[in-house]
Image (cartoon, rainbow, N blue to C red):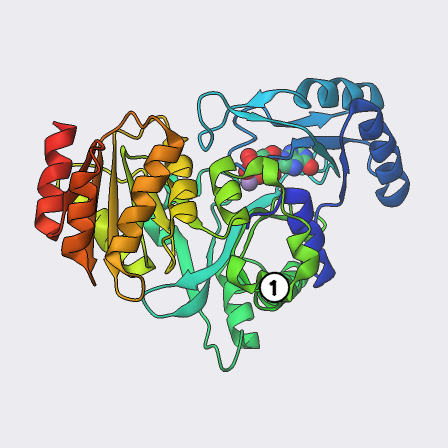
Amino acid sequence: MNLHEYQGKEMLNSFGVEIQRGIVAKNPAEAVTAAKKLTEDTGTGWHVIKAQVHAGGRGKGGGVKLAKSLVEVEQIADQIIGMHLVTPQTTAEGKLVSQVLVAEDVYYPGDSEPSEFYISVLMNRATGRNMIMYSTEGGMDIEAVAENTPHLIFNEEIDPTMGLLPFQARKIAFNLGLSGKAFKQMTKFVSSLYTAYVKSDSSLFEINPVLKTSDDRVIAVDAKVTIDDNALFRHKDYEALRDLREENPVEVEAKAVGLSYVDLDGNVGCMVNGAGLAMATMDLIKQAGGDPANFLDVGGTADAERVEIAFNLILKDPNVKAILVNIFGGIVRCDRVAQGIIDAYKSIGSIEVPIIVRLEGTNADIAKKLIDDSGLDVYSVIEFQEAADKVQEVLA
Ligand code: GDP
Ligand code: MN
């Protein structure tokens, strides 16, 4: 689950991470009230108005703007709220902005040397350990830094039994070229950041930029936070931060009925029981020259009702040109699944795309006969390879 910048910053701050302070606003009037309050609390005269959407690159897309007066706060908030923000990370239509973060301006006017760093915390999947990835080249496109000057990106891996050790925090501050008060502030920043990462069960923190001001404060100016969905049951308070408007509507619908569905870019819809078989099926589709349109695990009980729900979810994707149903009848009998497919098909009425059904396992032959005799526009196969060939054939 991804958090909005303002939610991520609040969460980080609750673990002692210093942040650029801000207040979220849903309309220009609220933005002005927020700006006044920030001026009282922080003494700031200038404010940044930042679009709150789940996409990076907002600055480049015109979603982050500096306001030098309350009039400008109102004008900019009015301009950003309601806009469709297009960034390198959104579709061409962009994302509708329904709220902004009004934040203190932390780039002091006349500040000759603000330093923008990049710091992220994530799992190194090769070693199975958390690591802190960091660079002096923050504030801009970190992907370009990784591409052109990879030696400017450092990694610090953390032993899970020891946690982040003080010498590691010092090494990070040193590599970032800091000394004196800023050095100390950075070690504190990195330690609290790592504590926050572990305690919140997050799977990604990306803070870009981390700013060192000329008076040696070290603060998170941006925050991209992803919390591990599998740990959300331990964090009811974070669960409440979910913004369904930012999520794929079909995935939200699938989750509500207990199906595991992930939307993908391809053209072959998949309905499979079991996550492992679902992965293998996606490989099969790729090999046959197609591209999976989704990952969908219908689970053990592939009865008519679930199959119908699953078909309807898959058919919401306009890119789907064919559907491959790949079910292994181990616990559930193939003939029952076949009957489920036939019932679901009839209940939906008209399905415009070809369906290839591969049922293997208990009573696979009876299942194939049921489908063949149903008179429906469904191809039934038993062998994996046959299924692949059929996918290729219908896509051609
Ligand atoms: P992103 O573009 O979605 O990554 O959004 P960020 O929160 O990183 O903001 C984009 C850019 O806006 C930053 O790299 C800064 O250069 C700028 N910015 C952010 N906060 C301030 C601020 O307080 N004052 C000024 N002048 N610029 C800011
Ligand atoms: Mn950023």
Q: Quadrant of residue 111?
A: top right
User: 10 Å neighbourhood of mark 1: few (<14), some, or many (≥20)?
Assistant: few
Report whether residue 236 is seen.
Answer: yes
Q: Is residue 107 left or right of residue 254?
A: right
Q: Please provide percent x and percent y for residue 184.
A: 65, 65
- Residue receiving disc 1: 233
Q: Is residue 116 left or right of residue 262?
A: right
Q: Quadrant of residue 362?
A: bottom left
Q: Residue at x 71, y 57 (%)?
A: 13
Q: Is residue 240 above or below residue 320?
A: below
Q: Quadrant of ligand 2?
A: top right
Q: Please provide percent x and percent y for residue 82.
A: 66, 21
Judge by depth and name the residue closer to the eye, 186 or 15: 15
Q: Is residue 30 left or right of residue 276?
A: right
Q: Please provide percent x and percent y for residue 138.
A: 50, 45
Q: Is residue 353 above or below residue 162?
A: above
Judge by depth and name the residue closer to the eye, 57 or 331: 331
Q: Is mark 1 within 8 Å of ligand 1?
A: no
Q: Please provide percent x and percent y for residue 159.
A: 45, 77
Report whether residue 148 is seen.
Answer: no
Q: Quadrant of residue 99?
A: top right
Q: Residue at the right extreme? A: 40
Q: Is residue 173 above or below residue 42?
A: below
The amino acid beneath tag 1 is Phe
Judge by depth and name the residue closer to the eye, 224 or 346: 346
